[in-house]
Structure formats: structure tokens, C-alpha cells
Amino acid sequence: MTTETTTRASASGIARPEIRPTGLLRQSLAITRRNLIHIKRMPEMLMDVTIQPVMFVLLFAYVFGGSIAVQGSPAGYREWLMGGIMGQTIAFASFIVAVGLTADIDKGIVDRMRSLPINPSAVLVGRSISSLLHSSIGILVMSVTGLFVGWRIRGSLAEAVLAYALLLLWGFAMIWVGILVGSAMRSVEAVNGLMFTTMFPITFLANTFAPTDKMPHGLRVVAEWNPISSLVQAVRQLWGNDIPVPADAQLPMHHPVITTLIWTIGLTLVIAPLAIRAFNKRTQG
Amino acid sequence: MTSLAIEAEHLVKRFGDQTAVDDVSFSVPEGSVLGLLGPNGAGKTTTVRMMTTLSKPTSGTARVAGHDVLREPDAVRRSMGLTGQAATVDELLTGRENIRLIGSLYGLSSSYVKAAGSDLLERFSLSEAADRTVKTYSGGMRRRLDLAVSLIATPRVLFLDEPTTGLDPRSRVELWEVLRGLVKDGTTLLLTTQYLEEADQLADRIVVIDRGQIIAEGTPLELKDRSGKASLVLTVSRAEDLQTAAEMLRQRVSEVHVDEAARQLTAPAEGLRDMTRIAAVFEDSAIELDDLGLKRPSLDDVFLHLTGHRAEDTDATTDEEQAS
């Protein structure tokens, strides 16, 4: 491919600027920067990872918490709850990606970027980086909120770091779900509708807010095999906030860290190709 | 010898069993303006998407600034700018930030983008609004910014997909001025439009496209010549005079069309002489006229002549436009 690196004059004598080929990283960062300006201009975009989960913490810790018995957690229900809220917050990374992507496709921003001499993946990579940053802000806010309501990390530093890493890894897998949904849906309203009706039940039908052992048997099996439960159980264990796992719990509950890794890799392997196909199909028509 | 800035060669695009673009070929010499004219859904946008590497042709190909869209898409993207149908500027960024984003994606140095961006904003009368978010811009300002953004890398070829759709008449005329300035500087333009007047105003050559196929091609003058003669349009003041007036006219010209609702008579005419002759006839009669005029064929008539339907029939937004 020809690379035009010199300033050349057209027939009519206009100087044309030098166009230097740039890499995927620089392009993605330019797009990330743009997405972060959006957050700066519309801080209410962060409500989904700040006010909403904080509200959940307060609601569950103080309203429902009294009636949810958690035996064995060092500091009771409030500490046990934090892992669940964090799991839910990071699962919603898919939501953030989907909404942002659909809006950009809908407004023609994606087309405009694809008409530029850039790597077409930069649009998705930029969107993913900014969404992970967005979710990370949520995780940070949750950690601080947690400290206020009595949550503490009781494990080693390495384990604590591993727990945060698992959350981010899970967020990475969720990005692909977001790209898939964002490419398939025609409007932000449709994304909202779909994500609310799926992500809420999925994140509730798990060990996020209440222990699974009191659930009816069928429901309990589903909840314990729910990938969110593995993630939540893993971070609780790594932070030392967990309660003893009942012997009759499903397999993932006994090996949550490894199951979480398998789930994230598996989900990514299955969903990423579908997501890329959906995105290409949507934008190259 | 002038070289060709854009060449479309037998472009075809099918979506399922629907053919959106059906064997479209044309070429645009460097420094000239081509108007791609057609109603909504004629295949204009799909054609532009194929020529700007956004969509892969089912068959056929195109070259932009000498680069093949299929084999050298990156070279094509480096030599062209695209202004899409809706002004695709980022609402939450300021005008300056929009230019900066696209400039840095092009791989231009930030010092260049800064200087050239300020020049462009100045040129499009956006200097004052440069540091406001685009959300606060009017439709015309957004369009101008969209153009400024497309011009940051000084592309040789600029594609404009319905650049004035949704603009009020004044902003539209302003935008035309801007586009004429670009052409004077040597930029090649391809613009799609459903406004015949726009193609007439700006284009050196017009390609008329309907249902995915080219149905006519030529300079605006050539196209107007095709649809035949001028016509005489006469409006009577009182509705009861309409039939009498029509009779009087029929004695002098071959064919008279009566529009009762508008109290209007239309007849073919050769030129001004016909008009003065008819004016004299009515001068001596008791029939009062509101209006008498000679109407030269517009591109609207051309379109009607070529396709059997009006260019703007299919689009509701255009009606608003004409009412304003």
C-alpha cells in the first residue's frame, strides 16, 4: 500500500498536510479520549456505576439486610454483600458498551470514523477501553462505599489484587456481550429495554444479594451455575469475606476462581466472533 | 489533460434479493463537481458508501484519486473526505475538539491540526462558537462544522451526501457559497441531492439515478434541453373566466392544460414573442389576469419527464422545506 509521507502540492497548488500512518493504539486512545470527554460533559452518565450501586448497598445493607441471615461472615451481611454488588456493577459493563456503541452507530459517528485511514478495530478498542475505565470508576466508588459500611479486605494483598483483576477480566468478557448487543439493536431505547430485562434477573438470580442455600432446589442449581455467582464467590473468598460453602453446593461454588477464569475465557471465545460479525454486518451494509 | 478524480465502474449492490444499486458507472474529472440526483431510496447513499469504502460492492469497483476502493481502501481514505447525510459531528465535543479528534485520527500532527483547524473555523464563521459544545449549534452551523472536519486533511476529493437536507433556505445558500469556494481551490466534489435546484446551482455534470439505475446524464443545460420547451403559465382572476380563457388560448396554441383549483392555464410556448402575443389577446378582452409568465423547464420538469414521477414525491421532509 502506498504511504503518502511527503507534503505534496495538488494541481492547483494547495499544500496538503502530511498524513502519517498511525497505529491502532494511538487511534484507540484518541477515541477513548473522546469518550471520556463525554463523561466529563455529562457526569450523569456515571450514575449507573456510582449512585445506583451505592443505593443498592444502602438498600440491601440496611433495608433488607436485617432479614437476610448470613452466618459465618466475619462482619456479617454488609461485608458479604459487597462482593455481590461489585459483581453486578462489572456485569453492567456490557450495558455501558452497548449503549455507547449503538448511539455512535445510530448517529453516523462510526461511519465517519470508518471513512478515515484508521484500523477499523480502533472504534471498538476505544469504546472498550473507555467502558472499562467507566466500570473501574464504579468499582472504586464501591470499594470506598464498602469501607464506610464496614467492609474490609481480610485476605493477603496478592489475593486482593487477584480479586480486582478477576473483576476487570470479567468486565473484558462483558465488553463482547456489549458489542454484540450494541451492534444488533437499532436504538439506545432498545438496548436499555433488552439489558434491563436480561441483566437484572441474571445478576439477581445468583449469590449476589442473598445466599443460595435457602433457594428452592431448581433455582439454587441455576443460581450456583450462574457465571456471576462464580465471580462473586471468587472475590468474596479472595477478600476473606466469604462464608463456608455448604457441602451440597454445586461444583462452581467449590472452585470459584478457576470457574470464573473458565467462564470468562469461554464466554469471550464464543461471543467475541459473534460480536465482531454482528458489528461488521451492521456497519458494512 | 485532466485526470479523473472519481471513477465508478459497474457498481452493483444487492441486499438480499433487492438490488439497491444496479450497474452504475460514471467518472468525475479532477476539480469538477458531479451532482448525483435522485429521490429518496434511489441508491445515492449506497453508491457513496461503496465509493468511500464503507460498503463493499456486490460487483464492480470504483477508484478515488486513482486508488481502487477494494484493493487500496486506506489510500482512498487518505485522499477523500466524507460528509454524511446527518451532520455526523459529536454533540458533546466542542467544534474545536471535533476537528482535533478527526485530525489526530488522520495522523496529522497536533500543531498542524491546531493551526489548520483555527483557519477552517474562521473560514466557516465558527470561530466564536469554536469552544462551545456542538449541542448548542444550529443546523447550519453543524453542517459547516461537519464540512470543516472533513477538510482538516485537505482531501482531494470530497463526498457530500445530501449536504443541505434539513437546512433552511438561507443556510442552504450559505453552504453553497462555501462549496463553490472549495471547488475554486481545486477540490473535486461529488454531492448527492434530491433538490434539483441544488444540482443545478453547483454541479458541472449531473447523473440522475432512480431505482438504482442511471437514467440520464449530462450538464444541467443538456438535461433541461431534453425535457423540451418552455411553457406559458396564465392565472385568471375570476374562476368563471377560466373556461373562456382556455377557449381563447386554444385558438392560438396547440395544447392547453387547465388547472381549475389554481385557476391556471399552461400551454407550450416558444419564447417571449409568444408571451407578448397572448398578453395582447387578453389585454383586449374582459378577462382579468392575475399573472402571466413564461416558465422555462426546471430540473424538476426534467425529472418528471425522465421518471414519470416528481423527485420530491417520496420525501416528506422536502415538503416542509418548500413551504418555508
Image: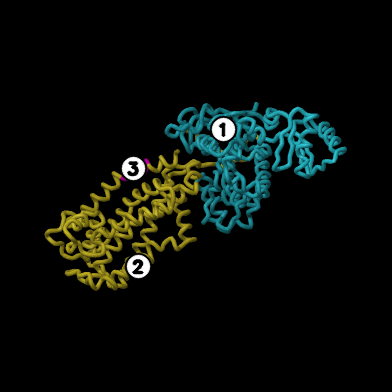
Chain colours: A yellow, B cyan
Which of the 4 image quarters holds residue B209?
top right
Amino acid type of the residue tagged 3 in the rendering: Leu
- State whether residue A29 appears in this view: no
Q: Please determine whether, in this image, residue A55 is positioned above or below residue B164.
A: below
Please give the residue where the numbered disc 3 appears in the rendered image.
Answer: A274
Q: How many marks?
A: 3
Amino acid type of the residue tagged 1 in the rendering: Asp
Task: Please identify the residue farthest to the left as the structure is shown.
Answer: A247
Which label sits on residue A54?
2
Place of residue B199 in the rendered image (x, y in percent of width and height, measured from the top left): 65, 37
Place of residue B109 in the rendered image (x, y in percent of width and height, measured from the top left): 53, 47
Which of the 4 image quarters holds residue B282?
top right
Mark 1 element type = strand
Q: Nearer the viewer, residue A11 or B262?
A: B262
Please tell me whether mark 2 or mark 1 is closer to you in this view: 1
Q: Chain of mark 2?
A: A
Q: Chain of mark 1?
A: B
Q: Nearer the viewer, residue A162 or A36?
A: A36
Mark 3 element type = helix
Magenta stretch?
A: A271-277
Task: Report how far apart the C-alphas of labels 3 and 2 lie in the structure.
Answer: 34 Å
Task: Report how far apart the C-alphas of labels 2 and 1 lie in the structure.
Answer: 57 Å
Magenta stretch: helix, strand or loop mostly: helix
Residue at the image point whose x is 41% and y is 63% from the top? A47
Q: Nearer the viewer, residue B54 or B230?
A: B230
Please give the residue where the numbered disc 1 appears in the rendered image.
Answer: B210
Task: Report how far apart the C-alphas of labels 3 and 1 lie in the structure.
Answer: 36 Å
Question: In this rendering, do the residues under marks 2 and 1 share a single chain?
Answer: no
Mark 1, Cα crowd under 10 Å, few <14 / some 14-19 / many 20+, is many
Task: Please identify the residue farthest to the right as the structure is shown.
Answer: B284
